[in-house]
Amino acid sequence: MAMNNRIQRDRRSIRVPGYDYAQPGAYFITICAVDRACLFGEIIDGLMHVNEDGIIVAEEWRRTEQIRCYVSVDEFVVMPNHVHGILCILDPVRRDPARRVVPAMGQPHGPSVGSIGGIIGQFKSVSTKRINARRRTPGARVWQRNYFEHIIRDERDLARIREYIDNNPAQWHLDRENPLIEGGSGGNRATHRVAPYEW
């Protein structure tokens, strides 16, 4: 029970307190597969080769901007056990009010619609359903419960993160998410928490 309480505190603490994650801006997102298992393909000679599940992940990540007029997808990469991507929330004036979902009654639970948390939650839900339908494994978990985000501060920050994402497959042998390297964070972990990246 004490471990579960610590996990809950850790999950909450990785968001910036009081920050509105629905406001316009660019966000660097990392989402890991459950237990950091290599579900989405493999790296061969520094290149990512996605499998069928990895194709689904890439398709659903791209669809993020197709179904939300207020979101733009920038650089992203599907890795063997995680996805890195940049999501941009555009000026709220460009949002389509007809696409807004209003709860039937009471206060909404979880992240607000249109926020980074809401967008990631929907991405994870839809990609999980598609992957489980393909595998015939209804209800199986695909993703960790949490995700890591970094608020991109300026053009220099954006350029550095784009380069990091672009080079990520070639750096897999050094990647902290690679379960095959000593000190990697792959395998079963009690906290299921994404360690912060140094930006």
Image (tube, grey):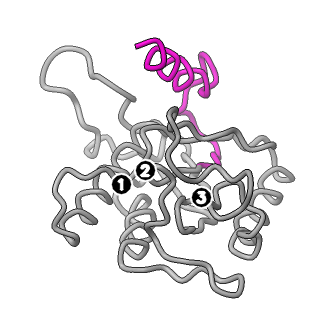
For the N terminus, which image quadrant? Answer: top left
Q: Which residues are magenta?
A: 1-29
Q: Residue at x 50, y 23 (%)?
A: 7
Residue 154 in picture, x, y percent from top left: 81, 45
Q: Which residue is mark 3?
A: 85
Find the distance from the CA under tag 3 to the CA under tag 2. 18 Å
Give the residue at the far right of this rendering.
156
Q: x, y (%) of residue 56?
A: 36, 71
Q: Residue at x 54, y 61 (%)?
A: 73
What element does badge 2 sit on? helix
Along the viewing direction, whichever of 15 and 107 lies nearer the viewer:
15
Q: Nearer the viewer, mark 1 or mark 3?
A: 1
Q: Residues within 10 Å of mark 1 (few under 14, many from 20)?
A: many
The answer to whether marks 1 and 3 mark residues whose Cβ atoms lie closer than 8 Å is no
Q: Earlier along the polypeptide chain: callout 3 or callout 2?
A: 2
Q: Which residue is mark 2?
A: 34
How many C-alpha atoms fall within 10 Å of the one at disc 2: few (<14), some, or many (≥20)? many
Q: Residue furthest front?
A: 182
Residue type pointed to by label 2? Val
User: Nearest the camera: 67 or 171?
Assistant: 171
The answer to which of 176 and 117 lies nearer the viewer is 176
The CA distance from mark 1 to mark 2 is 5 Å
- Identified at 38% across, 64% down, the residue is 60
The quarter in which the C terminus is drawn is: top right
Q: Amino acid at mark 1?
A: Val
Name the mark on residue 142: 1
Q: Is residue 18 magenta?
A: yes
| Disc nearer the start of the sequence (1/3) | 3
